[in-house]
Image (tube, grey):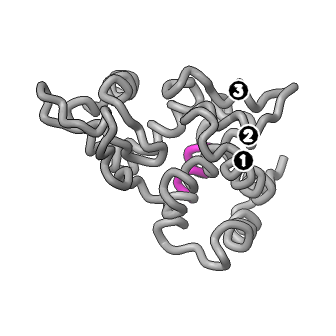
Amino acid sequence: MINRKFFFEETKTRLFNGTINSQQQKTLTNFINVWEADPVTYKDARWLAYMLATTYHETDKKFKAIEEYGKGKGRKYGATDPQTGKSYYGRGYVQLTWDYNYKKMGDLLDIDLYHKPELALQDEYATPILFVGMNRGMFTGKKLSDYFNGTKEDWVNARRIINGTDKANLIADYGRKFYAALGIIP
């Protein structure tokens, strides 16, 4: 169980320059609730810490499901699909991109993300996209248990779950700070 008082005080100090706004509080609380509701699937607190770090980075510290800055302009995934009339630029907590990822994730979660990619911006969908996607390796084939398990702790290479090693050291630092703030109570 997570000591929430300790968690919010520590994250406020370590990551949010002394202030957590209502949106950040809401999303952080939601993530902790989802985590604690499924202890069979989510066993390792480092997983939660790394998901928090990823969200912190991918949402520009807002902890709000957002659209990619520039909406994929100049990138293939940002072009409008002639069949659907939609663009599959980054959205949500993990910046889900590419039509095939929207389709794959939508099929897995029984959400029509392919025809309605904007649904990835709603908390009720953005949260399972993050949790299920990172747990099962739905984005790059790499998953949380590849980097955090009984014999391994690799904060830097865990970035490969989402996006190669882009900003890997920075996000690893965020992850360690979130992990320290979790204050797990056995």
Q: Are the residues tagged 1 and 2 within 8 Å (C-beta)? A: yes
Q: Earlier in the sequence, mark 1 or mark 2?
A: 2
Residue beneath disc 3: 145
Q: Residue at x 29, y 46 (%)?
A: 73
Amino acid of disc 3: Ser
Front-most of residues 138 and 168: 168
Given the current orientation, which residue lies at the most extreme front position? 74
Residue beneath disc 2: 156
Is residue 109 toward the left or the right of residue 141 in the image?
Answer: left
Q: Are the residues tagged 3 and 2 within 8 Å (C-beta)? A: no
Residue beneath disc 1: 169
Residue 107 position in % (x across, y down)? 34, 22
Magenta-drawn stretch contains 134: no
Front-most of residues 117 and 10: 117
Residue 137 position in % (x across, y down)? 56, 24
Q: Residue at x 50, y 60 (%)?
A: 60
Q: Residues within 10 Å of mark 1 (few under 14, many from 20)?
A: some
Residue 142 position in % (x across, y down)? 61, 24
Q: Earlier in the sequence, mark 3 or mark 1?
A: 3
The residues tagged by marks 1 and 2 sit, at their Cα atoms, a distance apart of: 5 Å
The residues tagged by marks 3 and 2 sit, at their Cα atoms, a distance apart of: 14 Å
Badge nearest the viewer, 3 or 1: 1
